[in-house]
Amino acid sequence: MNIKFTKMHGIGNDFVVIDAYSSVVSLSANQIRAIADRHFGIGCDQLLLVEKSTLPNVDFRYRIFNADGSEVEQCGNGARCFVRFVHDKHLTEKNEIRVETMRGIITLTLENNGQVTVNMGPPRFNPDQIPFIADAPAETYSLDVGGEEINISAVSMGNPHAVQIVANTGSAPVALQGPLIEAHPRFPEHVNAGFMQIIDDHHIRLRVFERGSGETLACGSGACAAVVAGIKLGLLNSPVNVSMRGGELNIVWNGNNSDVMMTGPAEPVFDGELDLSRIDTQTVATQTAVI
């Protein structure tokens, strides 16, 4: 079976985007892992499927798969690439579209300057909604990570995030602590680990170790979670510019139960056609097992 795809990125967070709206596309976890592999496949942080929604007054359904084949609830950078993709492929002429995700409906707007604004919805802080194991909600929590106690803010932006403040993102222990936080037993569905450096009250630097993908050049939902955490702690004021290794996002949040608005670029890289029969799922599975 041959399928067409578009390789895209949102400030370095890269995606393989597939049109499953015009015709049905079904991929196994092994096939997704093979496609995402940077040596044996196309290579991406996540694979995105554009599908038809079954809900009234909703334009599309949006499914997100990490590089390890697991399906996840939300991806801010992917959402921006999504709206650019459906416009470029003439699947819609609307500048504002409503999209179904695993965690609800999000609204995406293609701006006149080519930037994309995503209404990420309100953040969630209740431990049961993240999910996170805690006796009661708190602004920060102490977490044992490899025998070291760190303080994190736990927040859901449709997917779970653990945000800690660091003195310098350049020297932050992302490679060491990232996997430990991601798989911490207090996060039963695993978590994205954010490392935030505050430059001033309207500017932060951020690195994110994403569950199922490892550290990425950018993370849209992670940027939203970090800004929300900083505002909640009284350290930031909206709007906030978030600098990541792949580029910058602008985040607006007015507090309480208001929606988080994220604005940034989305860029196509190339189009291609993939013969699924030639994807070597066995080699990728063997390499993963060895690692």
Image: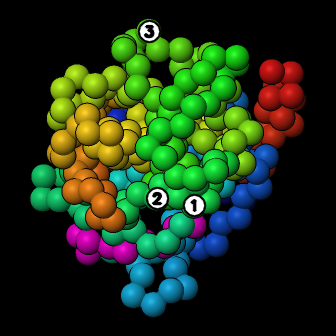
Specify few, some or many for label 1: CA neighbours under 10 Å numbering under 14, 14-19, or 20 or more.
some
Tell me the quadrant of the picture where the N terminus can be found: bottom right
- The answer to whether residue 251 is left or right of residue 149 is left
* Disc 3 element: loop
* Disc 2 element: loop
The circle on residue 171 is 3
Residue 143 position within the rendered picture, expressed as x and y whole percent measured from the top left:
61, 30
Q: Residue at x 32, y 73 (%)?
A: 97
What kind of residue is marked 1?
Gln
Tell me the quadrant of the picture where the C terminus can be found: top right
Specify few, some or many for label 3: CA neighbours under 10 Å numbering under 14, 14-19, or 20 or more.
few
- Mark 2 = which residue? 124
Q: Is residue 212 above or below residue 57?
A: above
- Mark 1 = which residue? 129
Over which residues does the magenta segment extend?
Answer: 94-102
Residue 243 position within the rendered picture, expressed as x and y whole percent measured from the top left:
28, 29
Specify few, some or many for label 2: CA neighbours under 10 Å numbering under 14, 14-19, or 20 or more.
some
* Disc 1 element: helix
Q: Nearer the viewer, residue 225 or 242?
A: 225
Q: Earlier in the sequence, mark 1 or mark 3?
A: 1
